[in-house]
Image (spheres, coloured by chain):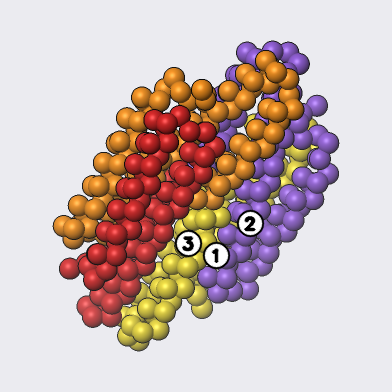
Chain colours: A purple, B yellow, C red, D orange
Amino acid sequence: MHGYSDTAEQHLKRLRRIEGQIRGLQRMVEEDKYCIDILTQVSAATSALRSFSLQLLEQHLVHCVAEATAKGGPEAQAKVKEATDAIARLVRS
Amino acid sequence: MHGYSDTAEQHLKRLRRIEGQIRGLQRMVEEDKYCIDILTQVSAATSALRSFSLQLLEQHLVHCVAEATAKGGPEAQAKVKEATDAIARLVRS
Amino acid sequence: MHGYSDTAEQHLKRLRRIEGQIRGLQRMVEEDKYCIDILTQVSAATSALRSFSLQLLEQHLVHCVAEATAKGGPEAQAKVKEATDAIARLVRS
Amino acid sequence: MHGYSDTAEQHLKRLRRIEGQIRGLQRMVEEDKYCIDILTQVSAATSALRSFSLQLLEQHLVHCVAEATAKGGPEAQAKVKEATDAIARLVRS
């Protein structure tokens, strides 16, 4: 059980919508749509991925804190380091 | 005909791979995979979307410059403004 | 003479304001201000740098297009490639 | 006392270096340097700000976890929410 399990259905809905946006992009390329309109749609999909990752991250950190409260800090500290490495990858992606 | 038409097939391949990454994310959520591994996969998909948009943008700008050479500047200048607005949206997404 | 020369004074004003934000960050650290408030100020400074770079970029691209109109495309095409490389670095920074 | 107090001197050194980069940008504009070189320098300063904020964030989260261990979760949970809001602002700046 991870921090996000309770809201897995909500995450899946969000990811299916993003999948739809990516298929929409394929249609736009096939129909030779205007470049700038495609780029606008890419921005929308990227934003949606960002929102998904930020929500997942929050749930993960809440979970780390809960674990620290229950079991003490050292293991949770290691997870914070792991989480900030993931944030660094997100920020630079 | 837009700037990217010649490479449409290559763009579609790239977008299908991104669609696969998004479906991979759905599987990871369904299988209750570890949060940090999901975030790493989100970073990979976001990077792939960025690369796609940067390539599209380059083709568009090359096209604008070609148009400016052929028809003169004013219309192409307006397109540069439009393109930098799209870049601003990308940078902030 | 580059594309941005006419607005150099405006750029300098903007950069001096960003320099002020960075000095403000130093004061916040010295006065042991709350972490989250410092991060909010970092976001503001980063946004200001982004705006500066986007304006500079637009002026540069407008200049490229003007050059293409005057002298023909090949040299301007090379500059577009150079500009999109710079955009890629900005997006990932 | 915040999570970053022990390393305040290191943060100040980093911020002074960023201040130097911003002043370097001003000189580049005054000396009418090439646009793309200025943009490369903006990317470097933005990256340095990012690194600073990621380190500060890690220290803050480690502190939250330590607090949760000592005092129990509710207050620390609220701080995690506050931290992820700050991350969202950073990601979008």
Disc 2 crowd rating (10 Å Cα; few below 14, some 14-19, many 20+) is: many
Under circle 3, the secondary element is: helix
| Residue under disc 3 on the same chain as residue under disc 2 | no
Q: Tell me the quarter of the image containing the N terminus of chain C.
A: bottom left
Measure how far apart labels 1 and 3 are at the Cα level: 11 Å
**Residue B63 visible (yes or no):** no
Dot 2 or dot 1: first in sequence order is 1
**B75 to C48, vertically: above or below:** below
Residue drawn 50% across and 50% down?
Answer: D93
Numbered badge on residue B88:
3
- The front one of A16 and A74 is A74
Q: How many marks?
A: 3
Whether residues under marks 1 and 3 lie with C-beta atoms below 8 angstroms apart, the answer is: no
The quarter of the rendered structure image containing the C terminus of chain C is top left
Using the image, name the chain to which the residue with label 1 belongs: A
Q: Is residue D14 visible?
A: yes
Residue that carries the numbered disc 1 in the rendered image: A39
Residue extending farthest to the bottom is B71
- Residue drawn where x is 22% and y is 58% of the image: D29
The location of residue B75, given as percent across then percent down, is: 40, 84
Whether D58 is drawn above or below C86: the answer is above
- The type of residue carrying mark 3 is Ala
Seen in the picture, residue D20 relative to A35 is either above or below; the reply is above
Q: Residue at x 81, y 40 (%)?
A: A7
Q: Is B60 positioned to the left or the right of B19 in the image?
A: left
| Dots 2 and 1 on the same chain | yes
- Measured in 3D between alpha carbons, the distance from the residue under mark 2 to the one under mark 1, in whole angstroms, is 10 Å
Amino acid type indicated by mark 1: Leu
CA gap between label 3 and label 2 equals 15 Å
